[in-house]
Image (cartoon, coloured by chain):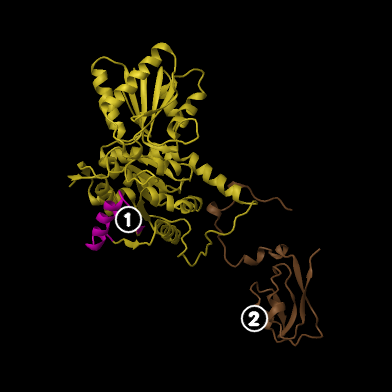
Amino acid sequence: MPKILPLNGDDAAAFAMKQIDPDLVAAYPITPQTELMQSFSQFVADGEVQTELIVAESEHSALSACVGACAAGGRVMTATSSQGLAYMWEILYIAAGYRLPIVMNVINRTLSGPINIHCDHSDTMGARDSGWLQLYGENPQEAYDNTIQAVRIAEHKDLRLPVMCCMDGFITSHAVERVDLLDDNVVKDFVGEFVPTHPLLDIEHPVTYGPLDLYDYFFEHKMQEIDAMSRAERVVREVSNKYGKMAGRSYGLMEPYGMEDAETAIVVLSSTAGTTRATAKEMRQAGRKVGMIKVRCFRPFPKDELAGLLADVKAVAVLDRSDGLGAYGAPVFNEVRNALYDRDQGPEVVNYVYGLGGRDIGQPDIAGVYADLADIAATGKVKQRVRYLGVRE
Amino acid sequence: MTEKPGWKRIPTGGLILTAGNAKEYKTGDWRTQRPVINRDLCSNCLTCWINCPDSSILVEDGKFKAFDLDHCKGCAICVTVCPKKAIHMEPER
């Protein structure tokens, strides 16, 4: 029987991992991911999963163990945050480069320094070009649903790339919400058996992972990875549709609200999408034509779908929970504005960097952004392209 | 150089799907010096064969036959270990 439990994002993702029952999990604790691994460790200790759990001495070792186990032929998962993801850096590229379908929950936390344990997206935005897919979940329910879908996305025969499921540190990872859980058997059927393509433990078919790959072949192997990533949008859509039919909760690459007649719009990821939707809803009830788009899938970036939704809008604000220091605007802004550049005419696009180091963002902040957009839509003038929301002068 | 296959025709992820093919990778062109043997001094003790890290001492009928210059990287360990000082290095041109 499907059931409903009060779970925070960490526990929801751990519950999904329990139902997936991967062959191996290797991890190292870091706030705010710790509770996820604590919950999963309890499932291991209680014998509720068959998983081999490796408590590694660092994140570098944890992801290295995942690479080895996945190459050996296992279904492998891990989780981390912030400095932990930074410490995994070189192995991120190796996992993707060897085409190993590892699934990792990343509980978004800023990168030091100064040291801070709270949410922003600096950690995963830095890894956006590492060859991993990135799904951003808004709440514990999506943390649960994304984790299950990620297994099938990563292991899809047309893809074979690792997937990060991101959720906002503390805001999502530690806030208890209602989560609809699927039956264990339903999840087991959905993820199916992992069929490795070239398992190291198949001694009848010896294979070498990680040989030296110089200028005469490296580019070709990278091209294969690029080619696989070009199919990722379709794969994410396919798996999400299947999941929607099975679970009754549909997901796309993005989730628009009020875009059918919106004159101004906000593009945002993760938990702030909830704050934005609530604000937009109130403003629409007051007769204002505002909309918003939550980008769920940031890698691959669904440029065509997004540009289509924004085509008739007059002004767009992209909310970024990380900065692109030295760049012209932050990462999501760059993607969105770039996606719109190919259109003959499109909206003005402005950027608001917000919430760094866990700085709260509330509905009045979002309402202020909509007010700025209304001004741009009315005058056609952008006073300042990139702004910083909620920072003290 | 022969034309190499494109990205659509090679195994993904840089994997090598067959075993025992390290010998096809010619490392001899890494060498800046080559080993040269003085047969008059060599006692065929094969200490060089035991110590060569690249299996580049070729042996026939229990005796030193030649250096495998396709794979010898020129490390000169054979020169160091030879009890008869029968091997010396000469620069590659």
Q: Quick check: do tags 2 and 1 share a chain? A: no
Residue A54: give x, y in percent of width and height: 35, 62
| SS of the residue under disc 1 | loop
Type of the residue with mark 2? Ile
Q: Nearer the viewer, residue B21 or A269?
A: A269
Which chain is yellow in the picture? A
Quarter of the image where the C terminus of chain A is located: top left
User: Relative to residue A240, is residue A205 drawn left or right?
Assistant: right
| SS of the residue under disc 2 | helix
Q: Is residue A267 above or below residue A164?
A: above
* Chain letter for mark 2: B
Q: Is residue A52 above or below residue A238?
A: below
Question: In this view of the protein, can residue A73 be seen by the observer?
Answer: no
Residue A25: give x, y in percent of width and height: 35, 58
Q: Which residue is mark 2?
A: B50
Q: Residue furthest top?
A: A379
Q: Nearer the viewer, residue A50 or A95?
A: A95
Q: CA distance from mark 2 to mark 1?
A: 47 Å
The residue that appears at 36% across and 51% down in the rendered structure is A80
Q: Nearer the viewer, mark 2 or mark 1?
A: 1
Q: Is residue A132 above or below residue A249?
A: below
Query: Chain B appears in which tint?
Result: brown
Residue A20: give x, y in percent of width and height: 30, 53
Q: Nearer the viewer, residue B25 or A267?
A: A267
* Chain letter for mark 1: A
Determine whether label 2 and label 1 are within 8 Å by CB: no
Point out the stretch of residues depicted in magenta. Answer: A25-49
Type of the residue with mark 1? Pro
Is B63 within the magenta?
no
Q: Which residue is mark 1?
A: A29
Label disc, if present, on residue A252 of the rendered structure = none
